[in-house]
Amino acid sequence: MRFLIYLIVYPFLWCISMLPFKLLYLFSDFMYLIVYYVIGYRKKTVRENLALALPQLSASERLNIEKKSFRHLCDMFLEMIKTMTISKKEISKRFVFPNLEVYKKLEEQDKSIAMMLAHYASYEWVISMNTYVNFSAFAIYKKIANPHFDKLVRDIRSRFKAALITTKETVPYIIKNKNNHLLSIYGFASDQSPKVASAFHWQKFMGIEVPVHTGAEMLSKKYDMNVIFLKVKKVKRGFYEASFEILSENAKEVPNYQITDKFLKLVEQQIYEAPEYYLWTHKRWKHKR
């Protein structure tokens, strides 16, 4: 049954990926009307998250952000599908790295790198970074239940030399690569909510105390990796800038959770600058004190 669904959906996805960007975004506008006004996909969750995280804004201001965030969500979903057929030249024009030299500086140290980022703007097109790096790239993700769509996602991202590994595979891959002297960069989207039972650290995020992921920091300490933050900014529809900021060049010497806390502050700054580009559909504040 899962394979049948895949066979039905795949040609449709491929056709969408072949659309020129002008038509792609027209389709996104149509999708927004369906998703927001007809289906109401996670509208209640988004509304609750905005009220929790941005209580200083009026109800009308939050509603405006809510609608813009759904428009962006539809854009990002279709941009992910577009990745199936987009050329390296096209994506490099639309997703640029204005201070790539900051990242290159870390590569020169011959240590693997943990890259921390948020579910903000276009985290999907971050894979285009692999065109510029010399290290082997691994993106940590949550496995999709349908194995055929899971393989499709892996294949899409591997077009730009990015290997997807699940959270359970992360530590074995780091150990294997370290033993084989394979310098690597690992992408951690560390802004989402971990399971409470496995949470080692709580910190305020957007003014609310929540459990936070500390895996990127702890693994960097244990396996002597440099840590860098990637801040993605949406310049205009379909165009993004991603800039780097070094979080640590000697993680072992940094007090526990300091790197994670700094990461959270940087993500907060991103959100306050343009909250409509954050992924508000996730239940980030489902566990709070």
Image (cartoon, helix red, strand yellow):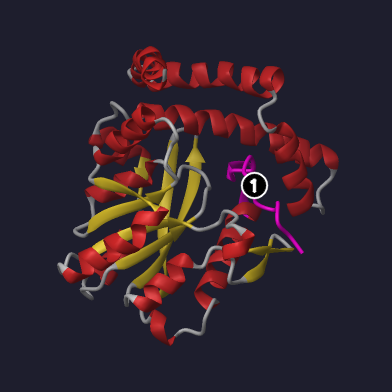
The quarter of the picture where the N terminus appears is top left
| Span of residues in magenta | 273-289
> Is 242 placed above or below 125 here?
below
Q: Position of residue 199 (x, y in %)?
A: 59, 66
The residue that appears at 28% across and 26% down in the rendered structure is 85
Q: Please name whichever residue, 9 or 231, is drawn nearer the observer in this view of the structure.
A: 9
Picture coordinates of residue 48, whole percent (x, y): 77, 43
Secondary element under disc 1, as helix, strand or loop, is helix
Q: Is residue 183 left or right of residue 49?
A: left
Query: In the picture shown, does residue 97 fall above or below 197?
Result: above
Is 25 placed left or right of 44 in the picture?
left
Q: Looking at numbered disc 1 in the image, what kind of residue is underneath it?
A: Pro
In the rendered image, the residue lying farthest to the front is 1
Which residue is found at the position 28% from the left and 71% from the top?
Answer: 106
Considering depth in this image, is 91 or 3 the residue closer to the camera? Answer: 3
In magenta segment, residue 263: no
Q: Nearer the viewer, residue 74 or 13?
A: 13
Q: Which residue is mark 1?
A: 275
Res 79 quadrant in image: top left
Q: Residues within 10 Å of mark 1 (few under 14, many from 20)?
A: many
Q: How many marks?
A: 1
**Res. 185 image quadrant:** bottom left
Q: Position of residue 44 (x, y in %)?
A: 75, 35
Question: Image height check: is 283 above or below 103?
Answer: above
Image quarter in which the C terminus is found: bottom right
Q: Is residue 98 visible?
A: no
Residue 205, image x, y percentages = 67, 62
- Hey, which residue is sitting farthest bottom in the picture? 253
Q: Main secondary structure of the magenta part?
A: loop
Residue at position x 82%, y 54% from top?
56
